[in-house]
Image (tube, rainbow, N blue to C red):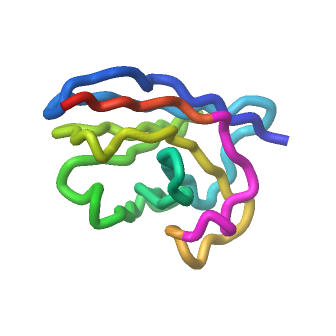
Amino acid sequence: QVQLVESGGGLVQAGGSLRLSCAASGRTFSRYGKAWFRQAPGNEREFVAAISWSSGTTYYADSAKGRFTISRDNAKNTVYLQMDSLKPEDTAVYYCADSRNPVNRYNDYAEYEYWGQGTQVTVSS
């Protein structure tokens, strides 16, 4: 079983940047999709970005396009989310997710079997 550990969250002012990391342990990442989701208090978990581990193809929510970048380091078994031009509405707990099977809908949380514990991102205005 794979364990996912997120890091890099914190408090930042609007317009600032953060880089989230998601490291896998126990087992290596599968060759399938990895994603970041987020959940703000009172809201449902929502898709942020995803990447195909094998091809590197990326997918973004409209709210993330142009500001966030998802990337992977196969050698380090790590997925990153670079977040720039942060806004107060980006405040949420951010979760890393891993799929052990081919992903059909990258923005669907049901496609992912393993989840990290989450890291808090707070953007002040």
- Residue furthest to the right in view is 1
- Foreground of the two, 125 or 22: 125
Instruction: Answer above or below: position of 103 versus 56.
Output: below
Where is residue 34? Give x, y as percent: 56, 53
- Residue furthest to the bottom in view is 104
The answer to whether one can see residue 67 in this image is yes
- Foreground of the two, 53 or 79: 79
Q: Does the magenta stretch include residue 72?
A: no
Which of the 4 quarters of the picture holds residue 96?
Answer: top right
Task: Give the residue displayed 62% in from the left and 60% down from the top.
Answer: 32
Task: Give the residue displayed 85% in from the left and 42% down from the top.
Answer: 1
Instruction: Answer above or below: position of 10 versus 121.
Output: above
Q: Is residue 109 magenta?
A: yes
Which of the 4 quarters of the picture holds residue 48?
Answer: bottom left
Where is residue 39? Give x, y as percent: 51, 49
Where is residue 13? Give x, y as percent: 20, 25
Where is residue 33? Give x, y as percent: 58, 60
Q: What stretch is highlighted in magenta?
A: 108-117
The quadrant in which the C terminus is found is top left
